Amino acid sequence: MKKYFPAIDLMRFFAVCWVMSFHYFLGISSTLAFYRYGNLGVQLFFIISGFVIAFSIQEKSIKQFTASRFVRLFPLFWFTCILTFLVTVLIHDHVSLKNFFLSMTMLGQALNVTAFVDGVYWSLTIELFFYGFIALFTHFFPFSKIRIFYWSWFVIVLFFYLAHIDEGILGKLLIVRHASYFIFGGMLALIVEQVDQKVRPWIFDIIFAGGVAIFATVINERSLPPYFVPIPIDHFWVTFINAALFILVPLFVFLIRKLPHKINNLVIVIGGITYPIYLIHQRIGMIIAGELKSYVNSYVAYTLTIVMVLAFSYLLYRKDQEFRKYLKNKIKVLHE
């Protein structure tokens, strides 16, 4: 049975706003501020994905899961990728046709694309690989064995780090640098499900999830090197925030289970617009802000840009909802 967690949509929206503020405001101030570490919002997205997919894949065949992920991700991605490419070309910036077509596959990170149509696409490749791994496992094994998937993946991650081969091609293909976040999210889903079934959570699940969180925090300097910027205190704050994510996500999931109907509908919408915001905020947003900065100061320009990005994302969300409904009626496998 499909479950809805309003906390997940709230955290999604926070994460995308955090990432957006990082891209917009980091370069115009050297002072410490919440947006300085906004790129850690991507790790929050990975935890959320691990959590959500553990629920959504349980009762689906690999065909159903693949079709549902395709409908959820690709139509909107293709539209925004084409739009971003055209806008970029119109302002006389350069993105090669080769990189455009490679970006359209959503596999640019794995294909070593040096210039994405939009820089945020790298994380979509990571997400896609995760979907592929868990879909293949649940195709050959029942979902009741999913712990084997998480345990095995974590053992692989440990081996790659201990052997100092996490930066190699195989390490990138197995996304060992980001695996801990997906694993933690998946284990959290198992724990929540046990609580919902009024079953005492298996103690090993809790210990394992905690161990994964501790490991991810300890090795964060190696796993997230681009996230460090040259201010000494950043090392502390990145580590602290990384650890806080593993505490706050379960806390919010358990505490925010039901909301009043009207508020719940609003939360669904703000959760729904996170994907279009993520897809358009960087390249298109930066272009808009660049034009606005000819007339107003940087803070005002980026604030106005955020308003426009939010409004356009809402429009994209509504149109995407309509198109996804149309596709679901056409793709029979979604109703099997």
Image: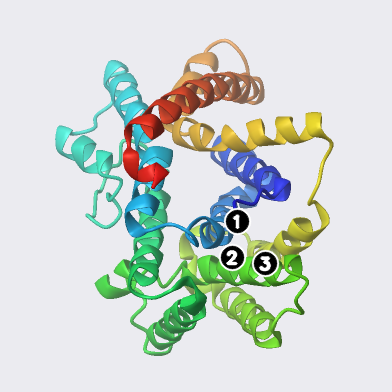
**How far from the left and from the top, in percent, is residue 189?**
62, 65
Q: Quadrant of residue 120?
A: top left
In the image, what residue type sits under mark 1? Answer: Leu
Q: Is residue 231 left or right of residue 317?
A: right
Residue that protrudes farthest toward the top in the picture: 295
Q: CA distance from mark 1 to mark 2?
A: 9 Å
Above/below status of 124 relative to 207: above
Q: Is residue 16 left or right of residue 158?
A: right
Q: Quadrant of residue 75?
A: top left
Q: CA distance from mark 1 to mark 3?
A: 20 Å
Find disc 2 in the rendering and name its residue: 185
Q: Is residue 79 left or right of residue 28?
A: left
Q: Quadrant of residue 243?
A: bottom right
The label nearer to you, 1 versus 3, is 3
Q: Rate crowding at label 3 as few (under 14), some (14 to 19) or many (20 or more) other CA atoms within 10 Å.
A: some
Residue that protrudes farthest toward the front in the picture: 336
Q: Measuring 59% from the left and 41% from the top, which residue is drawn there?
A: 16
Above/below status of 65 relative to 219: above
**How far from the left and from the top, in percent, is residue 81?**
33, 31
Q: Is residue 75 left or right of residue 42?
A: left
Q: CA distance from mark 3 to mark 2?
A: 12 Å
Find disc 3 in the rendering and name its residue: 193
Residue 243 can be seen in this image: no
Find disc 1 in the rendering and name its residue: 44
In the image, what residue type sits under mark 2? Answer: Gly
The label nearer to you, 1 versus 2, is 2
Residue 60 can be seen in this image: yes
Q: Secondary structure at mark 3?
A: helix
Q: On the rendered image, what quadrant is the N terminus found in?
A: bottom right
Between residue 288 and residue 75, name the one nearer to us: 75
Q: Measuring 33% from the left and 73% from the top, which residue is drawn there?
A: 140
